[in-house]
Image (spheres, grey):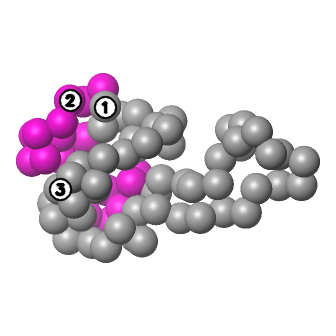
Amino acid sequence: MAIIINLDVMMAMRKKGLTELAGEIDITLANLSILKNNKAKAVRLSTLNEICKALECQPGDILQYVEDEEGDSHGTEQ
């Protein structure tokens, strides 16, 4: 995967737990956990907006582009 979601890092920096953040941004624990564990295939911009608002950060603090490894053209997980 070329886009890494560093939500867990930002949550730790802001000292916010999964349950607290899920309640603030009105998302299920299951869906937030998928994002936090870098298992998501997509994220809605409205969700990203709410996460950034709650964590007082920029999208670039959460999303990171990493070059795919040689021969990894199918987007397999790292």
Q: Which residues are magenta?
A: 7-30
Q: Of the residues shown, which amino acid type is indicated by label 1?
A: Asn
The residue at the far top in this view is 30
Q: Are marks 2 and 1 in contact (CB under 8 Å)?
A: yes
Q: How many numbered marks are there?
A: 3
Image quadrant assignment for residue 36: top left
Q: Is residue 18 magenta?
A: yes
Percent x, y for residue 5?
A: 48, 53
Is disc 2 placed on a helix, strand or loop? Answer: loop
Look at the picture and state if 50 lies above or below 36: below
State the residue position of label 3.
50
Instruction: Determine which of the numbered discs, if any, sits on residue 28 in the image.
Output: 2
The residue at the far right in this view is 71
Is disc 3 placed on a helix, strand or loop? Answer: helix
Image quadrant assignment for residue 42: top left
Q: Are marks 3 and 1 in contact (CB under 8 Å)?
A: no
Category of crowding for the residue at label 2, using alpha-carbon neighbours closer than 10 angstroms: few (below 14), some (14–19), many (at least 20): few
Q: Give the mark, 2 or 3, whose residue is nearer the N terminus.
A: 2
Instruction: Determine which of the numbered discs, if any, sits on residue 41 in the image.
Output: none
Q: Of the residues shown, which amino acid type is indicated by label 2?
A: Thr
On the question of residue 75 being in view, the answer is: yes
On the question of residue 16 being in view, the answer is: no
Q: Is residue 38 magenta?
A: no
Q: CA distance from mark 2 to mark 3?
A: 13 Å
Q: Of the residues shown, which amino acid type is indicated by label 3?
A: Glu
Left or right side of 3 for 36: left
The residue under the point 21% across, 52% down is 46
State the residue position of label 1.
31
Is disc 1 placed on a helix, strand or loop? Answer: helix
